[in-house]
């Protein structure tokens, strides 16, 4: 997206995080791994896990209600709810519809985005278009995941990575001082086999065989994904900087998808952004997929690392493969 005018602005953010914590020490008791190995390879120390009966829509609704309260906007005045998730309550209807019902946003259209860890970025770009078209005045963009229900806790390569959380943001038309400066998104379906959940769709509908083969859990080719993620996230950040005429020096804070500290450091280095200008909270939450960036965004604002006039670069990469970036002025 390129424009002489600022696009949609974020007026409030919120988060919902389960109280239950799964530490690296806990994982040592489940699979052949160690706290030291997990920290060294990923940067993760703990992740939050929902209690039985808690749904993705519950976390999304909780985060959304916090956002609306902060923004002093009534739920009935929300025009659209865009929910990024790969762990919805069920295949259909969209989990966004359950959120709409739970927060009583009676006038909102609601739909899901399945772009994995890039979902929140994709949602921001779609919301920006809706607000620029003047078809909406208030758009909720949510990233919410209950990945613990899709994780095989006997697979040492994946079970250390994922956690549950939700983050949300309310977007409105720019006031001329705040808003979207630029964005970029891309995908490559040729690499979809490297990160996926095979079971449950029309290709592998649920059977005794798919359950026995654990096809209803996340599968990832770790090394291949790592290599591509470094290049994709770096290129997404560089691309949006080039298209907006900005450089790393113009960015006050980089919020990358929290997948791996090594990926984060490589992304910052290639964008010429020093690590002191990078927000990292992976140690506390693990990889929360679509919830990762809005969760970090909310914490950065609450911590005072993002304030009026600051430029924030957000970059993400996820299954699909999908990747994208956005620069927002606060």
Image: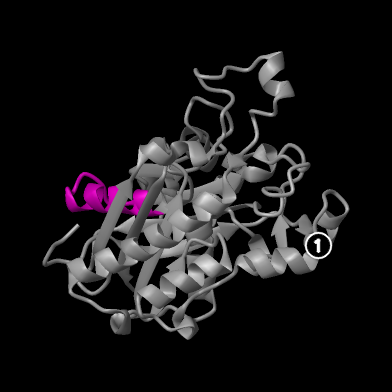
Give the image location of residue 26, x and y in percent: 84, 57
147 is higher (above) or lower (below) than 34 = above
| Image point (57%, 34%), residue name | 197
* Residue 102 in picture, x, y percent from top left: 55, 39
**Closer to the camera, 260 or 143?**
260
Q: Is residue 309 visible?
A: no
Q: In this image, 216 relative to 60: left or right?
A: right
Q: Is residue 157 magenta?
A: no
**Magenta region: which residues?**
121-138
Of the 4 image quadrants, the one containing the C terminus is: bottom left
* Magenta residues, dominant SS class: helix
Left or right of residue 86, residue 1 in this image: left
Magenta span includes 137: yes
Which residue appears at 55% of the width and 72% of the height?
280
Q: Nearer the viewer, residue 182 or 59?
A: 182
Which residue does the image show at 57% across and 40% down from the upper left? 57
In the image, residue 268 sits, relative to residue 194, either above or below, namely below
The answer to whether any part of residue 228 appears in the image is yes
Q: Quadrant of residue 216?
A: top right
Residue 220 is left or right of residue 240, and the answer is right
The spot of residue 85 in percent (x, y) is 50, 42
Q: Tag 1, which secondary structure?
A: loop
The structure residue drawn at horizontal position 53% and vertical position 75%, both measured from the top left corner, is 302
Residue annotated with mark 1: 34
Where is residue 271, by image quadrant? bottom left
């Amino acid at each position: 997206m390129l424009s002489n005018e600022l696009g949609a602005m974020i007026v409030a953010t919120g988060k919902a995080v389960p109280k239950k914590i799964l530490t690296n020490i806990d994982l040592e008791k489940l699979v052949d791994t160690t706290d030291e190995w997990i920290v060294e390879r990923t940067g993760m120390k703990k992740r939050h896990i929902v209690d039985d009966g808690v749904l993705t829509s519950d976390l999304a609704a909780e985060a959304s209600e916090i956002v609306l309260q902060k923004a002093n906007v009534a739920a009935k005045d929300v025009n659209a709810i865009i929910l990024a998730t790969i762990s919805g309550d069920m295949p259909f209807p969209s989990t966004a519809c359950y959120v709409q019902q739970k927060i009583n946003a009676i006038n909102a259209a609601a739909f899901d985005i399945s772009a994995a860890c890039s979902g929140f970025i994709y949602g921001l770009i779609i919301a920006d278009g809706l607000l620029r078209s003047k078809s909406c005045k208030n758009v909720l963009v949510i990233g919410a995941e209950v990945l613990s229900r899709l994780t095989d806790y006997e697979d040492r390569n994946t079970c250390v990575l994922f956690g549950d959380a939700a983050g949300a943001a309310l977007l409105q038309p720019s006031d001329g001082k705040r808003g979207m400066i630029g964005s970029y998104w891309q995908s490559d379906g040729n690499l979809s086999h490297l990160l996926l959940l095979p079971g449950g769709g029309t290709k592998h509908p649920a059977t005794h065989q798919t359950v026995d083969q654990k096809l209803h859990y996340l599968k990832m080719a770790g090394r291949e994904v790592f290599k591509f993620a470094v290049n994709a996230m770096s290129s997404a950040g560089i691309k949006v900087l080039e298209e907006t005429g900005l450089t790393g020096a113009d960015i006050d804070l980089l919020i990358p998808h929290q997948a791996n500290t090594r990926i984060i450091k490589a992304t910052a280095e290639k964008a010429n952004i020093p690590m002191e200008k990078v927000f990292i909270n992976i140690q506390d939450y693990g990889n929360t997929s679509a919830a990762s960036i809005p969760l970090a965004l909310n914490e950065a604002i609450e911590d005072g690392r993002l304030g009026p006039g600051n430029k924030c670069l957000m970059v993400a990469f996820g299954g699909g493969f999908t990747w994208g970036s956005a620069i927002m002025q606060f």
